[in-house]
Image: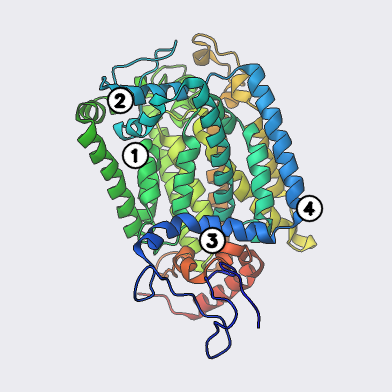
């Protein structure tokens, strides 16, 4: 008889002699409840422990030599990063602001009247965020710098892992290699570099959102991560709108309820600060910063610099509305297409399109908010890998070129090389403006590329959009498929063409719905 170890191959099993009538090992009953079902604590921790189990299984199956090489490259890259970081003497100024917010809460001071650092920076996040920053008030700044930097390194690894999980690439046994390389080399992407430099919370928000989106749609708690992220910063709330527009009403309502819950916690514990923020400060973008400076990589910042004005006005609103319609349309279209063909690929394109849209339409999107370029690059690399497996007669280089251009734009730091002292941002020459609008241009290019690819995919399956019933979303059955299912192992790519062809034949034979 074969002895199975605890936790192997998905379900927890007993050892030798525990088989049923067919000789197969049977699931070990949960001793937390008399009826053998999972205990409440086990149910609560299951969503948090599932990625840990997946990482453990992937590390067990990963090729040893490739993993060690990737780890070595990651360590060398991080050591080089810390050396450069020491030479440029980063300030981690946003971390200092977060600590001051926590101190204001601890000492009962006015949260939104305070100013800290030599730049007189105010608190700009909702009161709920200040409550979470409170423990930092007891830590000295030098120690806090070390802790925040270490936490960001770990969060970058988690963000990389969730990005590969969203894109369902590479296959499961190679994901540790990809995660190590992404985490080690990702620090050189300008948005991530700047996140580390300022001590920002962007990676926490990214991990919360991706953790939510990579869970099955049928999970009761789906939406909680997005709601908490929106409680820290308002921009991730667009993901709840996207979930609603794609028919995942329960997840959207859960996200909305969680976001409202963070507001209520703030009102309960910080009523005065909540009144000030939700009735006055939230509408004052000048507290966050100047819209027209190159640091602002939203579409409104681009309009300001192009028109040489400090206020985008109607032109900025129209540009943001056009980006919102385009981005949400592409995001919803890809998600519904993925549900139609039971492909995780559509969910990945839809999620990144939604993230890009949120960054474009926000009044202010600092360059470090664009950490979403990491999952974007992972997604483009997955398309390049699919392209490389195509027959030589129809093989192209377009996805590899697109991936290379995206990486080059993000490691160029080109927005900082244009003269920008004083009000020079308002007097840029026409040839300088693409350099200071690098991320909006990358985001718009991504949305246009996603829209064109979606159009071609819809033509390829020959199914008219209206009137066709949607198949269950690929993540709806992820819990039943388990860690070894197609959406978890990356094997879906190998059979996707045959599956899509079968779906197309089935749709052609079925009469259109009335």
| Lower sequence index among marks 3 and 2 | 2
- Please determine whether, in this image, residue 12 is positioned above or below residue 131: below
Residue 42, visible in the rendered structure? yes
Helix or strand or loop: what does disc 4 sit on?
Answer: helix
Whole-number angstrom distance, CA of label 3 to CA of label 2: 45 Å
Whole-number angstrom distance, CA of label 3 to CA of label 4: 29 Å
- Residue 344: image tag: 3
Q: Which residue is mark 2?
A: 106
| Lower sequence index among marks 1 and 3 | 1
Q: Which residue is mark 4?
A: 65
Quadrant housing the C terminus = bottom left
Quadrant housing the N terminus = bottom right
- Please determine whether, in this image, residue 370 is positioned above or below residue 173: above
Whole-number angstrom distance, CA of label 1 to CA of label 4: 43 Å
Residue drawn at point x = 53 percent, y = 54 percent: 348
Q: Quadrant of residue 415?
A: top right
- Residue 231: image tag: 1
- Residue 103: image tag: none
Q: Residues within 10 Å of mark 2 (few under 14, many from 20)?
A: some
Q: Nearer the viewer, mark 1 or mark 4?
A: 4
């Amino acid at each position: 008889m074969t002895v199975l170890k605890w936790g192997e191959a998905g379900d927890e099993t007993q050892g030798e002699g525990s088989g049923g009538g067919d000789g197969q090992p049977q699931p070990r009953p949960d001793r937390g409840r008399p009826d053998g079902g999972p205990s409440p604590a086990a149910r609560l921790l299951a969503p948090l422990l599932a990625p840990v189990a997946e990482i453990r299984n992937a590390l067990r199956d990963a090729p040893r030599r490739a993993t060690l090489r990737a780890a070595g490259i990651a360590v060398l890259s991080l050591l080089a990063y810390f050396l450069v970081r020491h030479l440029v003497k980063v300030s981690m100024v946003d971390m200092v602001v977060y600590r001051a917010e926590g101190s204001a809460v601890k000492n009962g001071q006015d949260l939104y009247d305070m100013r800290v650092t030599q730049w007189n920076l105010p608190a700009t996040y909702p009161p709920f965020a200040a409550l979470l920053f409170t423990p930092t008030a007891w830590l000295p700044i030098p120690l806090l710098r070390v802790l925040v930097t270490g936490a960001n390194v770990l969060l970058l690894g988690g963000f990389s892992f969730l990005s590969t999980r969203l894109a369902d690439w590479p296959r499961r046994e190679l994901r540790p290699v990809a995660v190590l390389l992404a985490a080690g080399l990702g620090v050189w992407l300008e948005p991530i570099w700047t996140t580390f430099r300022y001590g920002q919370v962007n990676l926490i928000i990214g991990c919360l959102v991706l953790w939510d989106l990579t869970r099955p749609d049928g999970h009761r708690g789906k939406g909680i991560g997005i709601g908490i992220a929106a409680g820290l910063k308002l921009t991730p709330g667009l993901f709840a709108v996207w979930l609603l527009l794609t028919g995942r009403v329960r997840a959207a309502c859960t996200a909305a309820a969680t976001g409202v819950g963070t507001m209520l916690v703030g009102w309960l514990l910080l009523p005065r600060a909540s009144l000030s923020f939700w009735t006055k400060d939230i509408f004052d973008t000048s507290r966050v910063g100047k819209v027209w400076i190159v640091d602002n990589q939203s579409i409104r910042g681009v309009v300001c610099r192009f028109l040489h004005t400090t206020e985008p006005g109607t032109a900025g609103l129209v540009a943001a509305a056009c980006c919102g319609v385009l981005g949400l349309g592409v995001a919803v279209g890809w998600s519904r297409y993925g549900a139609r063909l039971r492909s995780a690929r559509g969910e990945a394109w839809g999620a990144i399109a939604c993230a890009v849209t949120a960054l474009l339409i926000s009044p202010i999107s600092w360059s470090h908010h664009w950490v979403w370029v990491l999952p974007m690059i992972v997604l483009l690399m997955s398309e390049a890998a699919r392209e490389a497996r195509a027959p030589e007669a129809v093989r192209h280089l377009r996805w590899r070129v697109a991936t290379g251009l995206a990486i080059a734009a993000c490691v160029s730091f080109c927005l900082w090389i244009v003269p920008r002292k004083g009000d020079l941002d308002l007097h840029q020459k026409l040839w300088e403006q693409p350099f200071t609008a690098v991320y909006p241009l990358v985001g718009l290019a991504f949305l246009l590329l996603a829209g064109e690819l979606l159009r071609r995919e819809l033509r390829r399956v020959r199914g008219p959009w209206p009137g066709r019933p949607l198949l269950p979303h690929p993540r709806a059955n992820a819990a039943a498929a388990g860690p070894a299912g197609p959406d978890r192992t990356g094997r879906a790519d190998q059979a996707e063409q045959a599956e899509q062809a079968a779906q197309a034949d089935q749709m052609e034979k079925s009469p259109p719905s009335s």
